[in-house]
Amino acid sequence: MLAVLLALASAAMYGLSDFAGGIVSRRTSVWAVAIVTQLTALVLISVTAGILGGRPEPADWLWGAVAGVGIGAGTGFLYRGLAAGRMGVVAPLSAVGAALVPVIVGLLTGERPPLLTWLGIGCAIPAIWLVSAPAEGFGSLVRRPRLDEGATDGILAGLGFGLMFAALGQVPDSAGLGPLAAAELTSILAVAVLATALHGSWVPRDRVAWWGTAVGALASGATVLFLFASQAGMLTVAAVLASLYPAFTVLLAATLLREPIHRPQAVGLVLAAVAVALVAIG
Amino acid sequence: MSRSARRKKGRPYQPLPQRSNPWLARVIILAIAVLLVFGSFALFGGTQ
């Protein structure tokens, strides 16, 4: 149950950070916000790692760096797809991929969730898709299913975020938070390289980009909570529940910005609630 | 065992599963990382 609570808290913080990041990114370069976010996360996690201690092995640093590659590539392909106007395909594919990769890895490492948990995972995957697909994107998918447009970016972004969850799941609790700091450092380098390749302005020049520090604080808290959840329970459960973060983003947008919840999203929210209940009982 | 005793007993303790077969999962993780690195070079390199 502790792992479930930690994973849900992680999802809530990821959702809140995405919500805040979305607002900030409307006013300045998304790449600059991403860099400030990752820098803040690096500082906060490094300080916390120093306080909490830990004895990371060389392999733990490697898993952290691999997770950073996942964060950087996931961010890059997500932004690439969004910039090309393929949100309807890229966003849900990336979110579902983030959940599926650690499930497969968890199963291969010997995790065998009970039946109810499986049913919960079965509800969570379509829930993540429905909630993260924007209304116009979902509509266009229904009318004219052209998954090929943006599918590559969406799948690769999903592989990236899934890689982050799966690689962090290999870090034992004895390692502390040092490997997570390695992940953030690697992701900063990766995001800078990809932003340069896309001719994006990643140097934070205006004051608005520095609002990303709040986003970074939330994102780092979310990642730390996910790490603790994966160490307290099954990677499969922690990753699927943490991947429900779009549900929290949608709820925040509906509550604070009065954005409408469209029917597919409402169905997704209900499915997400059922998934959480089933996983918690299981 | 009576029904009340069975109810008090609750669910048995379920220890976390041993990660008995980690190497295959780790190979897959590293393969995805390599795929993403090469995919990034291929797709992002083409945008320049």
Image (cartoon, coloured by chain):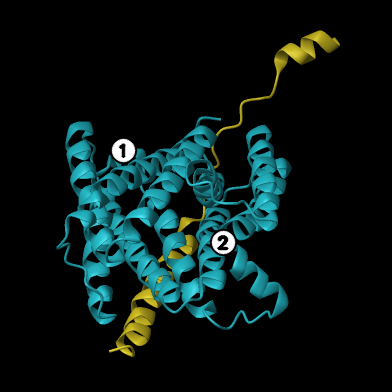
- Mark 1 / mark 2, whichever is N-terminal: 2
- Which residue is pictured at 72% across the width and 41% down the height? A116
> Splitting the image into 4 quarters, where does residue A117 fall?
top right
> Which label number is shown at residue A96?
2
- Which residue is pictured at 48% across the width and 47% down the height? A257
| B11 displayed left or right of A180 | right
Q: Which chain is yellow?
A: B
Q: Mark 1, mark 2: which one is toward the viewer?
A: 2
- x, y percent for residue A45: 24, 43
Q: For numbered disc 1, what is the local secondary structure?
A: helix
Q: Which chain is cyan?
A: A
Q: Amino acid at mark 1?
A: Ser
| A40 displayed left or right of A24 | left
**Who is closer to the viewer here, A193 or A255?**
A255
Whether residue A71 is visible to the viewer of this picture, yes or no, is: yes
Q: Distance of mark 1 from mark 2, alpha carbons?
A: 30 Å
- x, y percent for residue B22: 47, 56
Q: Amino acid at mark 2?
A: Val
- Which residue is pictured at 38% across the width and 43% down the height? A222
Q: Residue furthest front?
A: A258
> Splitting the image into 4 quarters, where does residue A163 fall?
bottom left
